[in-house]
Amino acid sequence: MLTGTVVLSTAIAVAALIVDLRTRELNHANREIVSVSKMLAEQTARTLDGVELAMEGVRERLSNDIGRSLDLSHPAVQLLLTSRSNGLPQIKSMFVADREGINVNSSRPDFVRRLSLSDREFFRHFVDRNSEEIFVSRPEKARVDDQLTFYISMRLNEPDGSFRGVVVSAISIGRLEALYESVELNFVNRIQLLHRDGVLMAGTVDRRALLGTGVIDQALPADEAAATGSVVIHDEAAEGRWHTAYRDVSSYPLRIATSVNEAVALRNWQGVARTIGGGTAVIILLTLTTAALMLKGILRRERLEEELKISDRQLRLTVQTVRDPIVTLNPEGRIILFNRAAEHFFATRFVDALGQDAGSFFTQSQPPVVATRLLQLLATARQTQDEPQVELITLSHQGNERPFELSLSTASFLGETLVTAVFHDLSERRRAELELMQKNRQLQELSAAIQNVRERERSRISRELHDELGQSLTGMRLEVSWLGSRLKTEHPELARKVTSIKELIDQTIGAVRRISAELRPLVLDDLGFAAAATWYTDQFAARTGLVITLELPAIDPPKGGAVATALFRILQESLTNIARHAAARTVDVHLRFADSQWQLSIGDDGQGFARTDSQRAGIGLIGMEERAQILGGQLSIATQPGQGTRIDVRIPDTATEEESHEANQGTAG
């Protein structure tokens, strides 16, 4: 009856647990897709904010005295459009249509001039209504390349407020799709960017064929619900039940929809349920088996205890051969084991030590302070009865003090707790460790000095290149521009030559800036690590094609300090190694400040490497590790072939309160 009751109770409890786990798994999936929808909504908003900011710059330039005097088809307007759209990969092109809806200028060199856009939605919106708000169109085919895209447009006004035209940005849907495809999470099966009316603007690859169509059959959540994130559950005939989280993209008539298929969300639960069910069956079987074996176990107990006594005697003989002193105490604190090494060290024979009270024995053989400390450790080990404890202690031997490693462990024998102390002499090891520590300290100090000198020299050369050579080249370009404007009418051939010279000067200025930034980014000293990291990852991503996700805390290491420099150099070296060796597509960079430490994590989805092959990038890895160790930090690498690489760096915050205050004042200013 007892066994039946236990089996039935177990089955009921396991069934309730499996149902509860299913509910928890679905709730977890809903929380995750809500979280991902928030993240993607913020990233999408930042992407479009960059476009809006560039267009605002164009409108401001065209609204000032010089801009109003220019015709919208003027080459200077094309230069303005090109400069504003460059560096924004989400913009395919930026163009201007006049009040008649004619495409008169564009950042694309191959744009179709005098193309009528008067019937396009992004133009009619401002013609039909007197609106100053930014407008986002639905996806439609571009007339230049016949590709699906959507447009963001902004009104241009004459000085009297009348309609002058529109400035329009063609948004790269592929860029947004790449962003959504980079979200490789098991609990997100589908990502869609929707217009407020349910039209698909962009999404993961499996939704590409539905661009520009209404893809939402169920009712969309209300604006206030979507603004904070809401989950809608709906059924699809072919794919079963879906959970979809909606989130508004702030300031835009768009929504992010992240979906998970219920069958996929419950895949782990199904495995767990099978495991729990199988485990429960095994437990029930074991319960029945245990009941049958219990009687047999009782009969074997006496025989095992006798065998244990024999084993104990064998152990005592083995302990005698150990070269470290070993002392074992019974529950009353009396010595019951005293090996030959202990006889030699404490100058006491086994027969004399056996049965002595530990307090009296150690008080007679050691100085009072040492004896008191030793007895306290023995008492603590007896009370805690935890894992073996290891302590460092100094013992007196023949008038000399010697360091020992004291290992304390407890064992239960016939219901009694025995405490064993093993004394391991550390004299030779301590001497070697001290010598090694001193040499390491000297090497670290030398390395730190070299690093500081190198960074100062890089900073000096970088500023001289940027300030002196950069200013000279800029002045040269202005003079050449002045000369070109004078020759344009009378000497067109010379004017074209001047233009070539200007382009060469521009390339030289770019090279000077690049070399200056690679030596030491001035933004690291002027604006701090966050600005330098953002600038560098953007440049690196544009140069290599990597998708880099950068997450930074609200606070920043002190500007120009050793911590900020070390973190930035480690980030540089890591990204360089990833570009050279990893064959990765995405990189995640996270910096956070916790427990008075700066914690930098850099992970990629590349091919990884075996730890034995780490010598491929030996100098780089050693340099990063040295930078962390110089500041009292540490660097760890987690990698396996085919599973990417993650570098974790922890550096303690070495800034004093005064440095932190000055850094905060500089940031506030």
Image: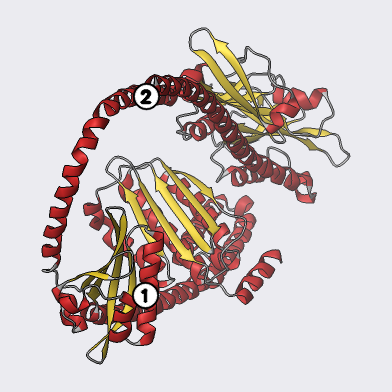
Left or right, 195 with reference to 240: right
The answer to which of 5 and 530 lies nearer the viewer is 5
The answer to which of 172 and 282 lies nearer the viewer is 282
The answer to which of 324 and 292 lies nearer the viewer is 292
Mark 2, secondary structure of its residue: helix
Q: How crowded is the residue under tag 1: few (<14 C-alpha within 10 Å), some, or many (20+)? A: some
Q: How is the image coloured?
A: secondary structure
Of badges 1 and 2, nearer the viewer stands 1
What is the x, y in percent for residue 227?
71, 31
Query: Looking at numbered disc 2 in the image, what kind of residue is underneath it?
Result: Thr
- Against 493, is 114 above or below? above
Task: Please name the residue shown 56% across and 72% down the image.
Answer: 655
Q: Quadrant of the N terminus?
A: top left
Mark 1 — residue?
Answer: 375
Mark 2 — residue?
Answer: 280
Left or right, 103 with reference to 130: left
Q: How crowded is the residue under tag 2: few (<14 C-alpha within 10 Å), some, or many (20+)? A: some
Q: Does residue 145 appear in this view?
A: no
Query: Looking at numbered disc 1 in the image, what kind of residue is underneath it?
Result: Leu
Q: Quadrant of the C terminus?
A: bottom right
Left or right, 240 with reference to 234: left
